Image (tube, rainbow, N blue to C red):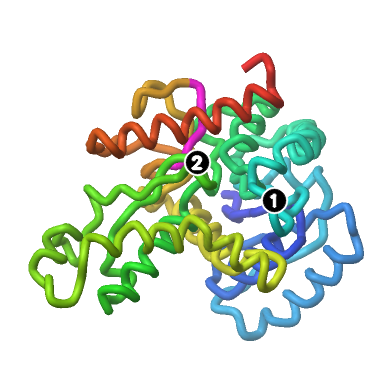
Amino acid sequence: MNEVRNRVVVIGTGAVGSSYAYGLLNQGVADELVLIDLNEDKAEGDVMDLNHGLAFAPSAKKIWRGSYKDCKDADIVVITAGANQMPGETRLDLADKNSAVFRKIVNAVMEHSFDGIFIVATNPVDVLTYVTWKYSGVPKERVIGSGTILDTARLRFQLSEYFDMDARNVHAYIIGEHGDSELPVWSHANIGGISVHRYIERHKNKYSEDDLEPIFHKVRDAAYHIIEKKGATHYGIAMGLVRLTRAILHNENSLVTVSAYLDGHYGQTDIYAGVPAVVSRKGIREIIELNLTEAEEERFQASAAVIRNTVESIYPSH
């Protein structure tokens, strides 16, 4: 009987890719880790550096600089390669540059009979997840974008700071585009099972509904502030990617906000957008369709239109 070896291939060893690889090592996720980058020296250096930490890792792992042929036996291919968002740029500004990069990458992966799950982290992630699905021909449930997994984590953090509560006990979602048109689903936000609105009502002397929108603005604009200060965001998204990878490899059936293919969900078809979804070893098992308020519904439709318009600008046959 052949031993099952969970293999993850990371394409792109920039700030996000290398941080993700480091996170996988630290948390003991996956048995084999393959790094691919146009800059082979950078990839080789990362491999050496990561291997030197194996003695302190929670589990054994084989790590090497590979090539696209290593995708043949991979369970997951994670794409973090592409042009970075520069100060003053929106994620959508990257669409043209990165879609061209992705055509080459995805074709190279599929040339080696890849039969696993794609995870896309490069921006604009909703657009590039869609083109990855189109370029690859892989079933839609096996192409997943990081979507609003980080935005949701940022919202949970900001709410935890505001309410002085452990972020793991704060539940709230950001949905739609991973970008400026995203929206918070306040109607489903809760603190320890109590709706945010009710929690505020119970503690009027400390909290106010008027504070919620500024909290969301901190979430929405976080990347701009981080990029301005340090040039890139990578730790938070790397942690989100590790969480997603664990959910897939361990067949957890976990609920995460990722960029998933909508086929009638939320009134949208033939589009990838950030929504709560159940993730398993097979990829997207189920999309959870939240009951949105009228205002939330309008904002979601507007956000989906932003994604669709960008896809149509780079993929006219859409």
Q: Residue at x 55, y 57 (%)?
A: 241
Q: Is residue 32 visible?
A: yes
In the rendered structure, does residue 271 fall within the stretch colored magenta?
A: yes
Question: Which residue is located at x 60 percent, y 43 percent?
Answer: 125
Residue labelled with disc 2: 177
Q: Please tell me which residue is depicted at 70% across the width and 37% down the height of the picture.
A: 95
Q: Which label is found at residue 89?
A: 1
Chief secondary structure of the magenta span?
strand
Q: Amino acid at mark 2?
A: Glu
- Name, please, the residue furthest toward the left: 202
| 316, above or below 100, in the image | above
Q: Is residue 245 above or below residue 19?
A: above
Q: Is residue 251 above or below residue 315?
A: below
Q: Which corner quadrant of the image does residue 200 belong to? A: bottom left
Residue at the far front in the pictured view: 210
Report the Cα–Cα distance between label 1 and label 2.
16 Å
Q: Residue at x 68, y 65 (%)?
A: 232
Residue furthest top in the image? 317
Q: Is residue 150 left or right of residue 299?
A: right
Residue extending furthest toward the bottom: 56
Q: Percent from the top left, x then y, of residue 167?
A: 33, 71
- Which amino acid lies under the numbered mark 1 shown in the image of this protein? Glu
Q: In this rendering, would 263 be left or right of 290?
A: right
Say few, some or many: other residues with alpha carbon within 10 Å of mark 1 (under 14 / 14 to 19 / 20 or more): few
Residue stretch rendered in magenta on the structure? 270-274
Q: Nearer the viewer, residue 2 or 257?
A: 257
